[in-house]
Amino acid sequence: MKKSLYLLVLIILITCSNAFAYDNDDYQVKVVTVLDVSESKQDDYKEQVVKVKFVDADIVEEDSEVFITNNVPNNKAYAINAEPGRKYLVTIDTDMDQIYISDYFREPTVILLTAIFIILIIIFGRSRGLKAILSLFLTGASIVYFLIPGIKDGQDPVLLAILISAFSTATTMLLIAGFTRKSLAATIGTTGGVAAAGLIAITVIKSAPLSGLASTEAHILLGNMPNTDLDFQGILAAGILISSLGAAMDVAISIASSTQEIFEANHRQGRRELFAHAMNIGRDIMGTMTNTLILAYTGASIPLFLLLYNESGLRLLNMEIIATELSAAVVGSIGLLLAIPITATAAVLLLKPLK
């Protein structure tokens, strides 16, 4: 328990080690506190002269307090309104020729919320809660350090997503359930369902066809990297798989665990009877879990639905952004459904091997 706690603290410290400085070769992003603001109204924007103090005073040679001109447009989507006493991110070019407020400093709120989440998991789950947090960090690390760099290097996004899914599932099951038959069955079921969903996703994306450029983020990425060889269709498919992974793991471990409990209650049951019990459990689970997945995609797309509310049905179903969201939800749900019989079969064969 203590070793796991030390490991968790180390991971958190590494993750948060760059909390106040973000640098690359072209610019620096720093944290400032606004000391004073004076403003004037222009035709289509508000001009602010903002006096700020750098949180890291060492980055400015002469003085840690500087004045910044901040233009606040009338468009709320791009408006960053400076207020005294509040912290912001500022971007500085390498020659210090230009400095501007680039965003709100939201990190403390995010870290506080995450800390509350971690504390609650540890309070209610104790050692298992701690293991769940460790598995979550390992999954996040695998995405940040393997999936994203691999995609940038031109590797197959779908294959990477399947491998990451297998790794994430295996580590999660080992940490939560130990090296047992039910954890192995759940890993096989989850990976099988995700792999099947990957094949379906590729088929749908090619046949629809979907470019993978329906989202604003994809447009920005393409605009910033116009000569890139990134496989946007593969990235779309990989995103679908990663999004459905959590729900597939929930279904798989529920079925594997329940099947093992049924088997231990009556060892004389045959494979067919045990499989029927597992599938009955899966049928009870699939309705709510499919709803969970569909509602997760729907909830993230409510602004889109409001924007397209008055469009005709024919146009709506043929718009790429709608087809992309719908395909992602359905393909993810299919992967979840396929994980049920795969997990049930694996659990039965592991509990009652063929002779």
Image: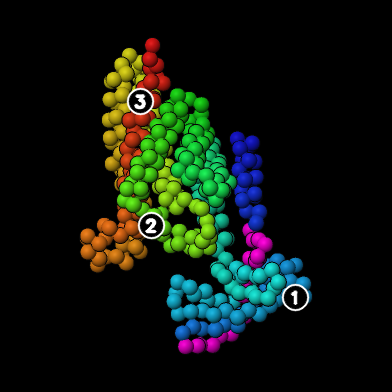
x and y percent of residue 115 in the render? 55, 52
| Element type where label 2 sits in the image | helix
Q: Is residue 337 above or below residue 81?
A: above
Type of amino acid at the residue the image marks with label 3: Thr
Left or right side of 168 for 282: left
On screen, residue 124 above or below 17: above
Spot occupied by residue 47 in the image (x, y as percentages of width and height): 54, 84
Name the mark on residue 345.
Answer: 3
Instruction: Describe the colour scheme in one phrase.
Output: rainbow
The residue positioned 74% from the left and 71% from the top of the image is 60
Question: In the rendered image, which residue does mark 2 sit on?
Answer: 300
Q: Residues within 10 Å of mark 3 (few under 14, many from 20)?
A: many
Along the viewing direction, whichever of 156 and 132 lies nearer the viewer: 156
- Residue at (38% x, 11% y) in the render: 355
Residue 236 in sight: no
Label 3 to label 2, Cα distance in Å? 34 Å
Residue 324 % position (x, y): 35, 54
Mark 1 highlights which residue?
Answer: 63
Asked whether disc 3 touches disc 2, contact meaning CB atoms under 8 Å apart, the reply is no
Q: Inspect the image, locate mark 1, and give the three-letter code of the amino acid beneath it.
A: Asp
Look at the magenta stretch and give its main secondary structure: strand
Secondary element under disc 1, as helix, strand or loop, is: loop
Task: Please report whichever mark, 1 or 2, sits nearer to the chain's N-terminal start.
Answer: 1
From where the camera sits, is residue 335 visible? yes
Q: Locate residue 308 relative to residue 70 in the image: left or right.
A: left
**What residue lies at 61% left-to-right and 74% top-to-bottom?**
100
The magenta-colored residue range is 19-43
Tell me if residue 289 is in the magenta stretch. Answer: no
Q: Quadrant of residue 63?
A: bottom right
The amino acid type found where label 2 is placed reads Ala
**What kind of element bears circle 3?**
helix
Name of the residue lying farthest toward the top: 355
